[in-house]
Amino acid sequence: MKATIACLALVLLAGPAQGVDRDQWLHVAVDGRGGNDERVRVNLPLSIVETVLPLIETKELRDGKVWIDQQDLSHEDIVKILASIRDAKDGEYVTVDDLNESVRIAKEGNYLTVHFEDHGEKGEIRVPVSVLDALVSGQDDELDLLAAVRALGEADDQTLVTVEETDTTVRIWIDRKNESD
């Protein structure tokens, strides 16, 4: 699960376009606990991510955009949903609680937040609504990663993802420091 969350966060954060604060840095910290001595730090200026992202070419990712296969929701539907979230009052939109997991999706100010607990793993994803708007600003069959990070680059310093497992903690954040906390 932590790898999935970290990949999702990196996809949301990868590569700003022109005009983004060049002093902004993307940080990823992975710390092992309880006998797991793993310690990883990634500290990248967004300008480097901006340069590298368009160079990555896969079946789904090219030119800083992810191509998606729309099966259940059209691009227009996704844009309408995000616009309604942006314009809606703060509140808890979805809550799922059962024996093994808990998920809460809410709007808190200008942020869409997801809190989760699943088999001892817990975490939070906090994304500015402006980043989600930018993500769907491209063509019908794509998610525009560069536009999403352009919007993120305009946001305040903040933690975007935290995940705590029994033996590992993951944190992803942006700020203007060139080193991890």
Image: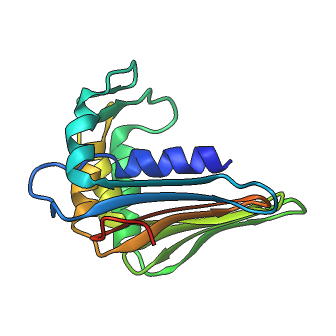
Quadrant containing the C terminus in the rendered view: bottom left
Q: Residue at x 41, y 59 (%)?
A: 27
Comparing 65 with 174, the one in front is: 174
Residue 145 sits in quarter: top left
Coloration of the structure image = rainbow
Q: Position of residue 170 (x, y in %)?
A: 59, 59
Q: Position of residue 152 (x, y in %)?
A: 29, 62
Q: Is residue 121 left or right of residue 108?
A: right
Q: Residue at x 23, y 32 (%)?
A: 54
Q: Position of residue 121 (x, y in %)?
A: 75, 60
Quick one: which residue is furthest to the top in this view? 59
Q: Is residue 64 visible?
A: no
Q: Residue at x 90, y 62 (%)?
A: 99
Q: Is residue 28 left or right of residue 38?
A: left
Residue 138 sits in quarter: top left
Count of marks overlaid on the render: 0
Residue 32 sits in quarter: bottom right
47 vs 97: above or below: above
179 vs 9: above or below: below
Comparing 42 with 5, the one in front is: 42
